[in-house]
Amino acid sequence: MLKQSLANNFWAVFKKIIPFLILFLVSLIPVYYTWGKLAIGGDTILPFNSEGVQKFLWQWYDSGNGQYFSQNQAPLFLIYKLFGYFSLSLTAIASIIFFAFNVLAGTAIYKLCNLVYKPKNTLYLAFPMLFYLLSPAVLNGWHYCFIYAFAPWFVYFITKILVTRHMAQVDIILLNVVVFFASVDLPNPKYLVYLYLFAGVSLILALFLRIINIKLILKNWWKPLLFFLCSFYLLLPLTFFALNYSPENYAIHIKQNYSDSGQFMDQGSTTINKMVQLHQSNINIDANERLNYNNSKKIVFVGSLFFICLLLNLFFKKKDPESKVELIFLVLVCLYLFFAVGPNPPLGFLYIYLVSNIGLLAFLRTTAGAVFFLSILYSVLLFGFIENFKDKNKFIVTGLLFVALLAASYPLIDGKFYKNLDIVGNKTVDKKSYGLNIPADYFAAKKVIDNQKIDGKLLNLKCDLSYINTTWGYFGPSIYNFLFDYYNIGFNSIISKTENHSVAFILDDKSLIIDKSKSLLQVDNTTTVLDASNLTLKAVSSDNFLAHFWIPTKSYNEDKLLGDLAENSNKKAFGEAVYLAEQNQSSIQTLEQLPAQTIDKPNIEYKKVNPTKYRIIIHQAKNPFPLIFNETFNKNWKIYPLSNQFQTKSELSTELENYQIIANNEDFQATKEEVKSDIDLGLVTSLNNGTNTSAKPSFVSKKLFGTIQNDNLKQGSLFDTLFKKSVLDEKHLVANGYANSWLVDPSAICRNQSTSCQVNPDGSYDLAMVVEFLPQRVFWLGLIISLISILTSLVFLVFKLLKRKNKQI
């Protein structure tokens, strides 16, 4: 009897463990196929380190000529920061991410099904877990998808409110954790919209079906508010971005803008029959395999079988509120089918009308993502279908559905999904290999580029920084932004003279397969820094370099069109600027005040604090002058006055003794003698940024056409501009076809902002200012609100737990 009892207990425990053993084994499938390689491509790329991600943490994206992007890459940054403490290879990190995402997703499905149905035998929960991990929907995704891993957790916590009729404060906090990781794809808000859509529709239907009542909402009104306040760091900047957004500025095209086809991207591929089967026709496997998969009657049958089972589920008698939760999920299946089918019949006309006529819905130009939510709903409802049967029949039904799943998802099981793809006719792709390795040349170039201190741009002669196609087999988003911790710019972004874009280095990626008909840029006066088999890196001569901030010697006010700018600017001398009337229609009066020639050209000393903030000091300014900032024009770039805080010459002389040239920066860095000369002239005002008094002075550039980059200027803080009003907003112009420019009158500024101004003995002025991107302040405000809300919530939660514990005592 004792042995029998122990055996029964062991089997009872083992049955609960079996689903997770199966989950771990299935989660290892991608690791098994891609071990030692990187499964990258399509629309997704794996970052290389935290340094390559940190440039994405700001509201201004410094790529091309710069662009306003309200994105959230903090989860990636934190993950790679954590990995940075371990000596792990890039491929090992990829395997960990693969495995962890699958385990996270499968566990969420387990808890969700267990929550809704409370099954007596948890062994059968293995099926919905497997269904979600091996769903045909994955065939249209790519290998690293945050939303696929975290969306089931969001659904779980919302469903928990419906089932338990209780809003737990800890669940609200955990919901925010889920949203944090699920929002990596911003500023494209489609996944975030799909999450909130699930929450909103579920709660409204639950009220209508009387699963929950209005008293629950009124009693817990502050908890949804808390949820939104905790996520303000996302919602506030994203709202501000939406208010400043237009599809034309971001190359987000909808039907009428597709000049090649005149239709939406998914028209004809996300048909209703395909979406019911959870995959569109353009799945990510080899072309021949794709054709066989799409034409297979077996695949059509088993894919449709899952949907039929959902419908049959309606005819089984259910207990309440289980039946009502299922009904809500079925309604949501219909809703997400609408978004997944998109521009195709039967309701494609409505979808097209909404997206074409409402600019803020331009993110729905593709239907990607909606099918992921269908996978979640299918997984739960199919388990509900299984639960309708008694034990013996349940085993048979589960077995048949499992066979159907294997048939529908065989590319995920036999590894075809993880093989390299030839998407664009690249004959160098090794289609027999599972993934690829990035050549060592790129990492050699990374060491050289990341060590450069000059605040310039890295120009890729053959790439527009969108998609690249290489002779070593990779096709997908350009790897340079994730690889190099430097400002990257593609050849297509050069719309004026090259020097007018602050280009400091030239990258010639010889592995790129390009259209030979494209006219490629030629840059003179360069020195080879690195010459490898796959790429060549060259440095531009410091004599041919214009810093991020500069003052032109001459300014031309012209009526020529933007398309004529490149040819026209090449006729201008080095350091001369062009202002086009068509781009400055709202500032015609300022344009007319622009001096044709800068008299007594001032000098500039500046520091790049981060991509959204620069400290700048104008030295020895007498007359009005145009100040140019080589970033894409945006009205949200603001100038704020800053109190003068200069070191004395004696302090600077003491600091100068420890000044050293940084290796491989000789071309742009000032020598000790040049720094001393600039100190004597009053052009270098700090050699210690105040963060570490014992540290050696940081990088100081040569005087580059009147501009000195001084990384020793103070970092400053959020409060530098917090309560200050910007100046020169009405003097903001577009220069050289893209850049920001302000007409600065030093005497007028000094009359109104005396604390930021210093009068020199010769009557000239030194002006201290901060140039800052306003949306970053909006982000900081949202972050502060979120942190206060989270901390308040945690304190209240701890207090509540302690109070409950004291009552028990």
Image (spheres, rainbow, N blue to C red):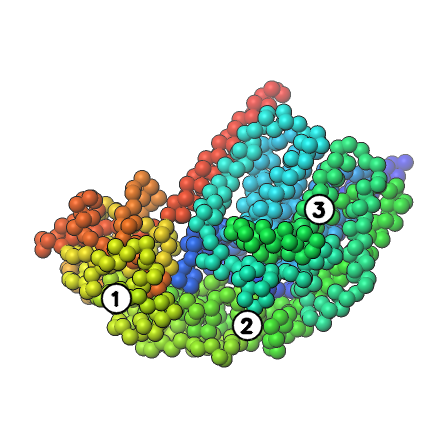
Q: Please name which of the two marks, 2 or 1, marks the residue nearer to the observer.
A: 1
How far across and how far down the image is residue 590, in percent?
25, 55
> Could you tell whether 258 is left or right of 302 in the image?
left
Question: Of the numbered discs in the image, which one, if any, rests on residue 333?
Answer: 3
In this picture, is 331 found above or below 583? above
Snapshot quadrant of residue 597: bottom left
Q: Secondary structure at mark 3?
A: helix
Percent of width and height locating residue 27: 69, 55
Q: Rounded to the nearest whole Å, what is the CA distance between mark 2 and mark 1? A: 40 Å
Quadrant of the frame with the N terminus: top right
Q: Residue sitting at 63 percent across and 60 percent down?
A: 266
Residue 275 quadrant:
bottom right
The first of marks 2 and 1 along the sequence is 2
Q: Secondary structure at mark 2?
A: strand
Q: Nearer the viewer, mark 2 or mark 3?
A: 3
Say which of marks 1 and 3 sits in front: 1
Q: Are marks 2 and 3 in contact (CB under 8 Å)?
A: no
Q: Nearer the viewer, residue 138 or 528?
A: 138
Percent of width and height locating residue 417: 69, 64
> Is residue 754 rendered to the left or right of residue 33?
left
Quadrant of the snapshot with the C terminus: top right
Above or below for 485 versus 755: below
- Please, what is the three-letter code of the amino acid marked with disc 1? Tyr
**Depth check, front residue: 653 or 245:** 245
- Residue that label 1 marks: 556
> On screen, 450 above or below 133?
below
The numbered mark at residue 469 is 2
